[in-house]
Amino acid sequence: MQKQEYTITVYTENQVGLLNRIAIIFSRRKINIESLNTSPSEVDSVHRFTIVINEFEEVVRKLCRQIEKQVDVLKAYYNTNDEIVWQELAMYKVPTEVIQEEVKVERLLSQHGAKAVVIRKDYTVFEVSGHREETDKLIEVLEPYGLIEFVRSGRVAIIKKSDGFHNKLKEFEYREPGEHAVENEFLDKNQEVFSM
Amino acid sequence: MDTLELKKQKAEEVKSVTISGGAAVLEAFLAEDVDTIFGYPGGAIMPIYDALYDYNERVKHILVRHEQGAIHAAQGFARASGRTGVVFATSGPAATNLVTGLADAMIDSTPLVCVTGQVFAHLLGTDAFQETDIINITTPVTKWNYQVTDAKEIPAVLAKAFHIAGSGRPGPVLIDITKNAQLQMFEYSGYTKCNHIRSYRPKPIVRKKYIEEAAKLINEAKKPFVIFGQGVILGKAEKEFIKFIEKGGLPAAWTIMGMSAIPTDHPLGVGMLGMHGNYGPNLLTNECDVLIAIGMRFDDRVTGRLDKYARQAKIIHLDIDPAEIDKNVKATVGVWGDCKETLPMLTELIDQKIYPQWLQQFKDCMIKEEAKVMKEELNPTKDELTMGEVINLLNELTKGDAIIVTDVGQHQMVACRYAKMNQSKSNITSGGLGTMGFALPAAIGAKYGAPERTVVAVIGDGGIQMTIQELGTIMQFKPDVKILILNNSFLGMVRQWQELFHQNRYSFVNITSPDFVQVAKGYYIDGQSVNERSKLKGALETMLNHKGSYLLEVKVGKENNVFPMVPQGRGVSEIILCKEDL
């Protein structure tokens, strides 16, 4: 067993203070959050958290149960990187003159799929979306040419196997939901003894 | 054209009345059958207290002496009655004084609804007088919390609060109401109880598959062993539980929180688990072949070292909280559900059996424990009094019918080891959090929760001094609480650890006490102090027969230790019976 990157997807009500409630589940256990993104989901009124952490699977499984235990949380899933499609957005600010003068830079930018967002006399902002390694690589490439500013967003991820949340939510709204909604994702998966 | 829906709405509109947010809080309480509130007024909650003035005849309000006292009293109320405890406190320091009680109620799954006042909504975040961010402060220690800034939200939010606090695995809920919302007049059209929140599943559907698997394991077992916690009491499943163990002939041990769910003298009850529990249940946890855990959460004080805990056994874990299953101990079969439902299903599938030899093993352990520990503790040969003999005499006089409220420390362990209890909800103690100062206010609350029962608060000389101001509450409202102080002139449990694990280096455990009887007198509460065996029984009788509250201080031996003990970092089968075994 090794620590690896897991993406936790949480469907929640849109409630003030819920971000804190979820964040302290991690901080209480001294677990560092690599990235966190909140956004609307495919369902109106339901919010979606995408949280990336580096941990052992058993720890992640327990964290998900603690998250799901919160009253305003509908459901929490965790996935390894090969079970999801994911992207991060990065932006780079570089001096415009460098691009004008050095043809090489222009070529490098297009090689990395960078798109210009803003072009001004003094600087230009490019954006790239992709995996961490890809956005990191462009920093290295641009640094010799005077990278002024860099920023990267939290990860957003789509679960490959997911059918979306519409049907699940309908089940949740019933007073007597079917097994589908109340099933505990983890009850069948018990191989290891935990130590946390 | 009026649709049916519109007509209904119109009818409701006619019924609505204009009331204040404060009054709406009390209307909600009446609808939830709240009859007792523990609280303390202050600036930011004054509109609610003003409304209370008009509801005074329908709701009792107990004015405590400190907000921590209010919340522990509400906990005692909830634990004795099985209902939700209710607390009022103002903003700022009053709200922060609730934090210990919230943490205690959270870890011991006690249903509470706490209403705190808050500064006007337009002042939020301005560092206003007595403003504190109580929502964020209490987030980790509440099952749910919410800030109300508009009175129109009050009925629905309180309905949600009571539903969340009392259902599923119960817990504390805090509702913070800004002063403007309390004052605001709004159209109130009645209170509707909440019984469904889409993101909240308090009661799972029980899956038969797991019941069947569990039953199969039990039926194949040679040495099955049941360990149970407060879940049995919270689930009001005491009868179902007894039917289950009686049909299966299953020996059953309780955690400190599960104590009194079955009568302590039940023939299948083999004692208490845990660090200072009984010898047999701890030792034989590592010998059973199927361990059936019901409504308990494998606390570290129960399991000792996890990698030496019941490794040989198949484990069945019944719990209403899925986060508990597999949290500390891996379950072979996890049964997620309310034990009120799961136990009868399981009982139906298990065979009628008895295990005379296996039960004999528990009895043999008890004989050993009696010889090495209990004999001297309950019938001491030394002159100085022991805590055990006090509890033993108390049993004799109350016949096991009293509610025993304990604080935290040696006296708590001794009381839980030796107290006899005939009925459920008789043991009220701070289990998970270990809150010193819990007992006195909790006993006050317990008396309001179960007025027909005798309530004895057993407290150490350290713990009583943490919330001694609540004697003032007893003075004013006169709940009949018997206060039994076991005074060993030490912070006894810490001293015991310093003796056993820190080479007798007694570091600040020597605590002095005031003359407790004089203090009680100052509060117009009768009392006496004894330190001789010949006077002990008479003194206990006087306390129990006294009309109204009474304080009895018993001066016991200073350096007695509680045994057996599972030393920290050791497995349950490494339990020791005396210091020399260490």
Image: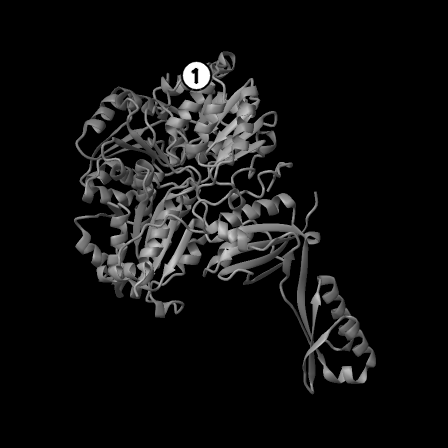
Left or right: B115 with respect to B267? left
In this orientation, which residue lies closer to the viewer: B235 or B298?
B235
Q: Position of residue A105 (x, y in %)?
A: 80, 77
Q: Position of residue B328 (x, y in %)?
A: 56, 37
Based on the displayed image, in which of its 4 quarters is residue B480 positioned? Answer: top left
Left or right: B525 with respect to B100? left
For the view shown, which residue lies furthest in the front direction? B1
- The residue lying at 49 percent from left, 55 percent from top is A21
Left or right: B405 with respect to B256? left
Based on the displayed image, in which of its 4 quarters is residue B543 positioned? Answer: top left
Kindly state the secondary structure of the residue where label 1 is placed: helix
Q: Is residue B178 visible?
A: no
Residue type for callout 1: Glu
Callout 1: chain? B
Reading the image, the residue beneath label 1 is: B370
- The residue lying at 21 percent from left, 48 percent from top is B59
- Quarter of the image with the N terminus of chain B is bottom left
